[in-house]
Amino acid sequence: MPAALAASAPEVASRKRPACCPAHAGSPGLLGNAPLPGDVGRGGSWRMNAQQLVPLALPRGRPLRCELCGGPAQLRCGACRVTCYCDVDHQKADWVSIHEKICQLLIPIRTSFPFFNSEKERKHGMEQLLHRQKHLVDLTHKVAQKFVFEGKHEEAIPAALHSLRFSIDTCGPDSMELVPAYLILAEASTGLGHLTQAEEYLSQAQWIILKTSDCSNGIQSKLHRNLGLLYAAKGNFEESLYHLATDVTDIWHAHFSRLIQVQSQTLTSPAEINILSEEVEISEEPLNEAQQAEASQVLDAILDIREQAPEQQPAKTASVIHALAMLHYLILDLPKAHDLGMKAFLITKQLPNQDASEAIHHLLKLIKSKPFYTK
């Protein structure tokens, strides 16, 4: 197991084991070589069963570790025979979370490769392995995310750990592909009140993001939202506001961009719009007065925080100003929209990455195409 996983065990690893836990009492019905009665359910689906590991029968130099906590394994899943646990509590936690869904999928991944007669066969075998691993990354991530959405934080952690492990196997320990799993683990840990653990996961995610030049705004937004929730749980509301402000800005920025995209395409070439397109939603509702007031109040407050912060972050400040410029354009306060747009454009022109300046330049062209007046 990678050190990152072994050093950051989830909540289920720290729960007190009951004195009568079969893992220590040696219950023959549960930990003997025979699986639990009824291990195969109707339709051929596997039910949870366990087999006790015999130390003398294990291969030397390759100690088996618990799937969840990384501790010495005492038993394994009797269905797939490739997944090990320190006790029945951890096996049950893994089963309820994700193992039931991936039990048989793990067999071809965790068993030894057969002998290949040619380089072509070996290459094909490696491609199949990678395809299976990527499928498991997607499946475990979706399951973990669903548990988090449902508020089932404890159930989310084993699935997210699997997603992280498979991501490491397929992409390496420093890849951006690991960040979604770290963020789910952090959110679930925060929901369970394990703030130190959540902070460790977020530190891992933040470290990867900081050294990656092409990180998406969506991923950065999720990182800041999780940091905001963490600091709020720790009672550091000033730091929480700072990080949540980043997330709020991104949400409004994306919403205004969609509104302007729809409006622009509708006005310039309505006949060319494909009403079935998934990229543009023609039914996007315009801002009502309450939304206008909320957006203006929140974004103005965030801009004030950004501009007065001891450590300036021009890219984030420009993003807030751009969002405000789009807001004023949408409510037809064109002079104000123009002033803000020019301010954002001048800031982005000084940045190494000028991707945002193109969108701001497009907004300025839209503003100039209309007669100036104040609503």
Image: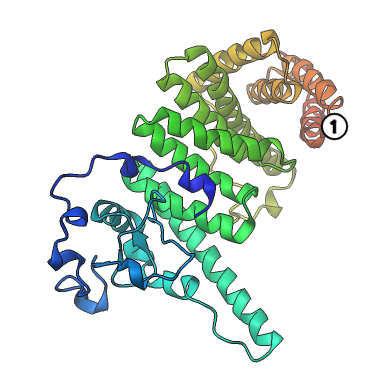
Q: Quadrant of residue 257?
A: top right
Residue ID at (14%, 73%)? 37
Residue 112: horizontal and vertical position, in percent?
51, 77
Secondary structure of the residue carrying numbered label 1: loop
Q: In the visual, does 111 lie left or right of 86? A: right
Residue 45: horizontal and vertical position, in percent?
26, 73
Residue ID at (79%, 34%)? 362
Q: Quadrant of residue 307?
A: top right
Can residue 372 be seen from the camera position used here? yes
Q: Quadrant of residue 260?
A: top right
Residue on which disc 1 sits: 352
For label 1, count other residues whose C-alpha is less than 10 Å away and answer few (under 14), some (14-19) or many (20+): few
Along the line of sight, the residue nearer the viewer: 100 or 197? 197
Q: In the visual, does 366 lie left or right of 204? A: right
Residue 27: horizontal and vertical position, in percent?
14, 62
In the depicted structure, whether residue 168 falls above or below residue 46: above
Along the line of sight, the residue nearer the viewer: 65 or 234? 65
Residue 73: horizontal and vertical position, in percent?
35, 58
Q: In the visual, does 273 lie left or right of 190? A: right
Amino acid type of the residue tagged 1 in the rendering = Pro
Can residue 281 be seen from the camera position used here? no
Q: Which quadrant of the figure contains the C terminus?
A: top right
Along the line of sight, the residue nearer the viewer: 357 or 52? 52
